[in-house]
Amino acid sequence: MGNKTYAMIKPDAIRNGYMGKIIDHTINAGFKILGAKLIRLTKAQAEGFYAIHRERPFFSELTEFMSSGQTMVLALEKDNAVSDWRKTIGATNPEEAEDGTIRKKFATSLSENAVHGADSDENAKIEIGFFFNDSELISNQ
Ligand code: ATP
Ligand code: MG
């Protein structure tokens, strides 16, 4: 059993038609999908999820964007899931992301950067709990 991380395919990537390609990239990078849902976050959910950034100047832009359309929420499993997923997605700003990363391939800008990744095991657990019940997380091993 590997570690878990929490990921999202953000509204820009879904609007741009990249949902399937990003799921493919995720599976090819060795992640098991334990849970997946296509939802639209409310503004309040986006504000709760990104509460850590509430004092930042981009908070309103970020939460408007995250509630602007469909988001796919994902619970992923792999050894070193948190750090490997951050490597797989690349830098926050797609212009700085390495070639071959999801953000380099599919993101549009710093604010519309295609995917999310939890930044620690602790936050991964909290973020998975934000969107999934235990019964929705199925290991196929
Ligand atoms: P995420 O948490 O979405 O995986 P991250 O951990 O790489 O991204 P954070 O610093 O947590 O980056 O920022 C959260 C999100 O806020 C970023 O993914 C980006 O969409 C947005 N963001 C960050 N900095 C800026 C900025 N300066 N201007 C606009 N949006 C920003
Ligand atoms: Mg972050």
Image (cartoon, rainbow, N blue to C red):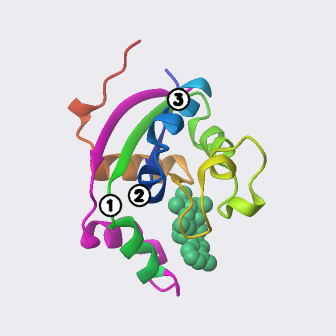
For the point 23% across and 40% down, the residue is 133
Looking at the image, tell me whether mark 3 or mark 1 is earlier in sequence order: 3
Q: Is residue 85 above or below residue 11?
A: above
Amino acid type of the residue tagged 3 in the rendering: Asp
Amino acid type of the residue tagged 2 in the rendering: Pro
Looking at the image, tell me whether mark 1 or mark 2 is earlier in sequence order: 2
User: Mark 3 touching mark 1, by CB under 8 A?
Assistant: no
Answer whether residue 136 is magenta in the image. no
Question: Could you tell me which secondary element the residue under label 3 belongs to?
Answer: helix
The residue most toward the front is 16
The Cα–Cα distance between marks 3 and 1, rounded to whole angstroms, is: 21 Å
Amino acid type of the residue tagged 1 in the rendering: Gly
Q: Nearer the viewer, residue 29 or 134?
A: 29
Question: Could you tell me which secondary element the residue under label 1 belongs to?
Answer: loop
Answer whether residue 56 is magenta in the image. yes
Q: Quadrant of ligand 1?
A: bottom right
Q: Where residue 121 sits in the image (x, y, percent)?
A: 52, 46
Looking at the image, tell me whether mark 2 or mark 3 is earlier in sequence order: 2
Magenta stretch bounds: 30-58
User: Mark 1 touching mark 2, by CB under 8 A?
Assistant: yes
Question: Could you tell me which secondary element the residue under label 2 belongs to?
Answer: helix
Q: Which mark is residue 69?
A: 1
- Mark 3 = which residue? 24
Name the quadrant of the C terminus: top left
Q: Is residue 70 above or below residue 125?
A: below
The Cα–Cα distance between marks 1 and 2, rounded to whole angstroms, is: 5 Å
Q: Where residue 12 sits in the image (x, y, percent)?
A: 47, 59
The Cα–Cα distance between marks 2 and 3, rounded to whole angstroms, is: 17 Å
- Mark 2 = which residue? 11
Judged left or right of residue 41, residue 16 is: right
